[in-house]
Image: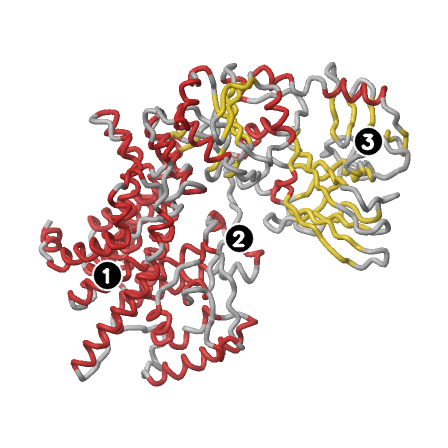
């Protein structure tokens, strides 16, 4: 309590609040006028976050479970981006006190914007803890807050956009370091728990900072090696938050087949270009000749500012070259190394290689940030991808680049501490240097915010029309929500399982979210994270090729019809068009049409496949070639059933192809008989173990060679993007391609670097045929094969 009273009596805090508020109004004043009518994004992850939050507040009966997507299963709220602390607080107040749900958008927006002000306050407190002058601390704190890379998350990643998260962790750790107590550890742990419920990356950042702190202190400070003291405080700070999260999940989440390895670890990484360059370019002509700047994925953008970028080498001296290590930048790396050695010698640090400043705790923070930066580069995994197989829980971090945010805060705190502590005999020069450092920082902060408001100031009138009186919302009055069980948006989308990835097309996601919020109906589609693999396959069957009797929990839960939300789009698939053709039109709006699809219709979609294929064999003129019936008199196809590799894993027949999935498995190599160059070819094959995590992310490569065997081209796709239909633990993959010359040879190779050497690839019934040629094979009273589809006899 005394500490709290001391803090609020600090005039620097109030001036920090005032200054940061003035800056906030300057850059975001238009949004602040009408925060409840502004959408920071009207598409992508931003719209998804608004949707999940609004739906959870208005329609979910549980505080822990979200029903808006992945019908009929729903999802635990931690995997939905619905910001549980905010949505559940609004939900509780609206249910038990006064309905404030209509102000949800404004609350979310204001929370993000005000997080900059809160961050500035805690940065001020941090700088004051390191004994910097209060006036200097005020200006530097506000500047760092507005330069923060987390502001760039405002257009989409709301759960990660709270600028104060890392500064608060650093401040709490400083207070603990100066006077350790279990009470401070408990406060730290509770704060981390709170922020972890927004997004688990917040826990990861805190665990990284605290973990390195404890490792260093356990090594260097005897009092920290008292096991009771260490275990108590580590448990409260780090173990308590993750334990509570896991207990909550254990009590409220029954899913046991989430991915353990999301895609993107080695793709969404940072690099020195995203941290030390403001626009990812090297402009100086004399540097361009030996510095090769790469284009960094946007996840890796975390520019630290001009002063930290230039003074980084001054602080880290001999170590400052490490982030720039690269074979194509070796000359620049060597120059930095030699420069660091010279700086180190001139600063008389020869005996203290790890000492950066005169403050031990600040040194710990600086080294923590340094290591976090290297980790954001995906080091050491970027050098040896095989190390990922031993990374354990670290593989869960898709956006590894985000760890550079720790470095942003620590290097800025360290640099401005260093500038303030520089010994300059002339007071005028000292003040001039401090003023100049503030000016440069504010220039960087200005550049970071000048264009942000324009991108955030979006409107979605259809949602702001609460009474549904506009023409755009007239369709609402024609929909009796209770009549339907769920929404099926077309084109369909399903992003979240990491094993099957169907991106939203046209305005399908936008339209589905609007209809769902207006009607309260859940949808079968998904745009979340770590979605159950088995639930994914259950849902996407809705829009795959009919293949066998539709047996899904969807039809066991309810016999109500489905509401199809069909967007104006040229990318609706053939299977989706079939669903539309078998549905009843209801009404339409400017951007979408609504149809009613009976549940019974889904059940019978595959009923006639066997009979129709049998009729085609009887009625069409077909030619028997190698036991296969073809609509072309010439053999223009390849069919391989792999029955010579006898095993009990086959999809069909006596055997299938098996191989080490990490190796390059050539499942076919050769030429296509009587090849055509003016037509599309279809490569199809059955791929096994699809319910096993990561298997559907296997790469398929078609290599094209001329008649002399020289490779002239190659096409790559992921198996998950070739999905046509599923049957138990197998999926049918289709890959369209064209040949350049009649005598060309092709080689089809499959591999998956993300799996281990103990994982086996299973492929069966490979077929290559011209798209306009139909092929058949009949096994009487068992099945008919048509174009690699095996339609079973209904009586079988």
| Residue with the mark numbered 1 | 141
Between the residue at mark 2 and the residue at mark 1, the CA separation in whole angstroms equals: 40 Å
Residue at 25% x, 49% y is: 29
Q: Secondary structure at mark 1?
A: helix
Q: Is residue 414 left or right of residue 128?
A: right
Residue 405: mark: none
Q: Position of residue 139 (x, y in %)?
A: 21, 64
Residue 775: mark: 3
Q: Secondary structure at mark 2?
A: helix
Q: Position of residue 737 (x, y in %)?
A: 73, 45
Question: Farthest residue in the front direction?
Answer: 471
Q: Nearer the viewer, mark 2 or mark 3?
A: 3
Residue 390: mark: 2
Between the residue at mark 2 and the residue at mark 3, the CA separation in whole angstroms equals: 46 Å
Residue at 79% x, 24% y is: 784
Q: Position of residue 504 (x, y in %)?
A: 52, 38
Among numbered discs 2 and 1, the one appearing first in the sequence: 1
Instruction: Count neighbours of disc 3 (C-alpha within 10 A) and say few if under 14, some if 14 to 19, many if 20 or more.
Output: many
Q: Is residue 687 visible?
A: yes
> Observer-nearest residue: 215 or 71?
71
Among numbered discs 2 and 3, the one appearing first in the sequence: 2
Residue 449 figure quarter: bottom left
């Amino acid at each position: 309590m005394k500490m709290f009273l001391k803090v609020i009596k600090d005039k620097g805090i109030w001036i920090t609040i005032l200054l940061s508020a003035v800056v906030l109004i300057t850059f975001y004043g238009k949004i602040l006028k009408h925060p409840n009518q502004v959408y920071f994004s009207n598409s992508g992850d931003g719209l998804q976050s608004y949707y999940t939050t609004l739906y959870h507040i208005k329609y979910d009966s549980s505080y822990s479970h979200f029903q808006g997507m992945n019908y009929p299963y729903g999802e635990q709220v931690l995997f939905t981006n619905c910001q549980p602390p905010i949505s559940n607080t609004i939900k509780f107040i609206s249910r038990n006190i006064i309905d404030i749900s209509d102000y949800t958008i404004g609350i979310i927006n204001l929370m993000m914007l005000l997080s900059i002000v809160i961050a500035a306050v805690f940065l001020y407190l941090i700088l004051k803890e390191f004994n910097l002058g209060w006036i200097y601390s005020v200006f530097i704190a506000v500047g760092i807050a507005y330069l923060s890379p987390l502001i760039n998350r405002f257009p989409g990643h709301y759960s990660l956009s709270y600028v104060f998260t890392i500064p608060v962790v650093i401040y709490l750790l400083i207070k603990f370091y100066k006077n350790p107590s279990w009470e401070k550890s408990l406060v730290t742990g509770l704060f981390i728990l709170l922020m972890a419920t927004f997004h688990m990356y917040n826990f990861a950042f805190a665990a990284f900072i605290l973990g390195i702190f404890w490792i260093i202190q356990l090594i260097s400070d005897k009092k920290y090696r008292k096991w009771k003291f260490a275990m108590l405080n580590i448990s409260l700070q780090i173990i308590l938050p993750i334990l509570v999260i896991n207990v909550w999940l254990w009590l409220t989440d029954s899913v046991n087949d989430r991915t353990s390895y999301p895609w993107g670890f080695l793709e969404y990484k940072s690099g020195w270009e995203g941290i030390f360059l403001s626009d990812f370019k090297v402009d100086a002509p004399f540097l361009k000749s030996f510095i090769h700047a790469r284009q960094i994925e946007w996840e890796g953008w975390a520019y630290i500012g001009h002063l930290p970028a230039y003074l980084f080498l001054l602080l880290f001296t001999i170590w400052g070259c490490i982030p720039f290590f690269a074979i194509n930048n070796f000359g620049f790396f060597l120059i930095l190394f030699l420069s660091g050695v010279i700086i180190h010698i001139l600063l008389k640090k020869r005996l203290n290689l790890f000492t950066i400043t005169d403050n031990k705790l600040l040194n710990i923070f600086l080294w923590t940030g340094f290591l976090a930066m290297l980790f954001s580069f995906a080091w050491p995994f970027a050098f040896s991808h095989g190390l990922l197989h031993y990374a354990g829980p670290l593989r869960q971090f898709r956006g590894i680049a985000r760890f550079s945010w720790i470095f942003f805060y620590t290097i800025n705190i360290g640099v401005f501490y260093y500038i303030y502590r520089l010994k300059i005999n002339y007071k005028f020069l000292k003040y001039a240097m401090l003023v100049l450092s503030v000016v440069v920082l504010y220039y960087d902060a200005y550049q970071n915010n000048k264009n942000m408001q324009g991108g955030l100031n979006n409107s979605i009138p259809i949602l702001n029309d609460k009474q549904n009186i506009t023409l755009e919302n007239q369709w609402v009055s024609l929909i009796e929500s209770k009549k339907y069980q769920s929404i099926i948006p077309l084109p369909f989308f399903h992003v979240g399982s990491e094993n099957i990835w169907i991106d939203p097309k046209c305005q399908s996601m936008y339209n589905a979210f609007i209809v769902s919020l207006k009607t309260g109906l859940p949808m079968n589609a998904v745009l979340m994270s770590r979605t159950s693999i088995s639930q994914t396959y259950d849902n996407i069957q809705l829009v795959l090729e009919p293949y066998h009797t539709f047996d899904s929990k969807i039809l066991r839960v309810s016999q109500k019809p489905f509401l199809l939300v069909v967007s104006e789009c040229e990318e609706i698939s053939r299977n989706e068009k079939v669903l539309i053709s078998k549905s009843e039109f209801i009404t339409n709006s400017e951007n979408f049409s609504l149809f009613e699809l009976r549940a019974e219709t889904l059940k019978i979609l595959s009923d006639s496949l066997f009979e129709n294929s049998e009729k085609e064999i009887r009625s069409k003129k077909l030619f028997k070639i190698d036991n296969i019936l073809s609509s072309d008199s010439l053999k223009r196809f390849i069919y391989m059933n792999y029955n010579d590799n006898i095993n009990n894993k086959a999809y069909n027949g006596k055997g299938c192809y098996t191989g080490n999935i990490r190796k390059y498995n050539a499942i076919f190599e050769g030429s296509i008989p009587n090849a055509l160059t003016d037509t599309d070819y279809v490569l199809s094959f059955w791929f096994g173990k699809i319910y096993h995590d990561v298997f559907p992310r296997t790469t398929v490569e078609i290599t094209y060679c001329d008649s002399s065997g020289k490779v002239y081209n190659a096409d790559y796709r992921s198996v998950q993007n070739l999905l046509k239909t599923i049957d138990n633990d197998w999926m049918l993959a289709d890959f369209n391609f064209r040949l350049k010359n009649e005598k060309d040879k092709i080689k089809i190779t499959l591999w998956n670097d993300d799996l281990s050497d103990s994982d086996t690839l299973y492929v069966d019934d490979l077929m290559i045929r011209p798209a306009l040629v139909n092929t058949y094979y009949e096994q009487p009273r068992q099945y008919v094969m048509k174009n690699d589809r095996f339609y079973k006899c209904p009586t079988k």
